[in-house]
Amino acid sequence: MTSYLFEPHPRPAAAVLGESAAFPVHRIFCVGRNYAEHAKEMGFQVDREAPFYFLKSATTLVPSGETIPYPPGTDNFHHEMELVFAIGREGFRIDRGHALDHVYGYACGLDMTRRDLQLASREKGRPWDFGKDFERSAVMGPITRAEAFGAPSGRVIELTVNGETRQKANLDDLVWKVDEIVAHLSGYYRLQPGDLIFSGTPAGVGPVVAGDSLRGTIDGLEPVELTIGPAE
Ligand code: MN
């Protein structure tokens, strides 16, 4: 048993619908520009050759229902509503036909983004971390087990801010489907139980301000809710 110089941080974990045990989170992968209309609003065409990714630290995870402070260093804090899927079985170079066997479940997530910092780093060809991987930036509702949810297709995905719809699309609009992402990503990483994948956001991303209430839904899943508090 290792002894530590100070108390280690608690392991990030996500709630699972109908389970008293939590899902321990290992890594958070995020897919970029995975809806054609969102790619367009960001000034790009979708690249059909291969998906691309960025990561968020597992420690950025926040459960649904929290109030988070408006983050430091930004004047353009954006919502990105996303389907999240959770890996429950280890796999390397998984073929597409077996990909969904590795998915433990699905959840509603918010990939909160410091858009001004992301765009500044994008322009300079620098990493996106300051725009994407910061404290309390990955928000997630409880996981619904894959058997209970069914196929990750044909569902409406929607985000409201203060009751007004900001993002609305269908999971069928995903450029890279869940099985394709699992197959592709597992060629570069040994996927592990506890890995989460944020699958990308539809069009309609935009700023939030202190006092805003966000509510993201996907048919068949528990919603994700977030309130923005004042800056610290
Ligand atoms: Mn995103």
Image (cartoon, rainbow, N blue to C red):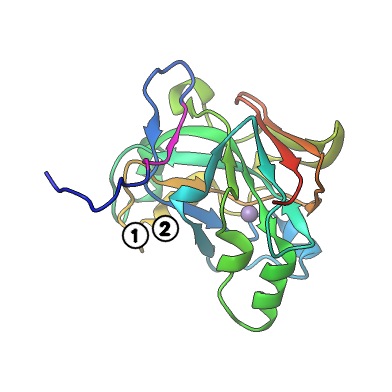
Q: Nearest the camera: 61 or 152?
A: 61
Residue occupying the point 66% across, 42% down: 68
Which dot marks residue 189?
1
Task: Kindly indicate whether the residue at mark 2 contacts the one at mark 1 (C-beta within 8 angstroms).
Answer: yes
Quarter of the figure that contains the N terminus = top left
Mark 1 C-beta closer than 8 Å to ligand 1: no
As drawn, 80 above or below 221 = below
How far across and how far down the image is residue 99, in percent? 39, 44
The residue under the point 51% across, 26% down is 150
In this view of the protein, can residue 22 be seen by the observer?
Answer: yes
**Nearer the observer, 89 or 21:** 21
Name the element at disc 1: loop
Which residue is pictured at 36% across the width and 23% down the height? 21
Asked whether residue 152 appears in the rendered view, the answer is no
Q: Amino acid at mark 2?
A: Leu
> What segment is highlighted magenta in the picture?
10-15
**Image quadrant, ligand 1:** bottom right
Determine whether 6 is above or below 52 in the image.
above
Task: Provide the major secondary structure of the magenta segment.
Answer: loop
Residue with the mark numbered 2: 185
The kind of residue tagged 1 is Tyr
Residue 182: give x, y in percent of width and height: 43, 50
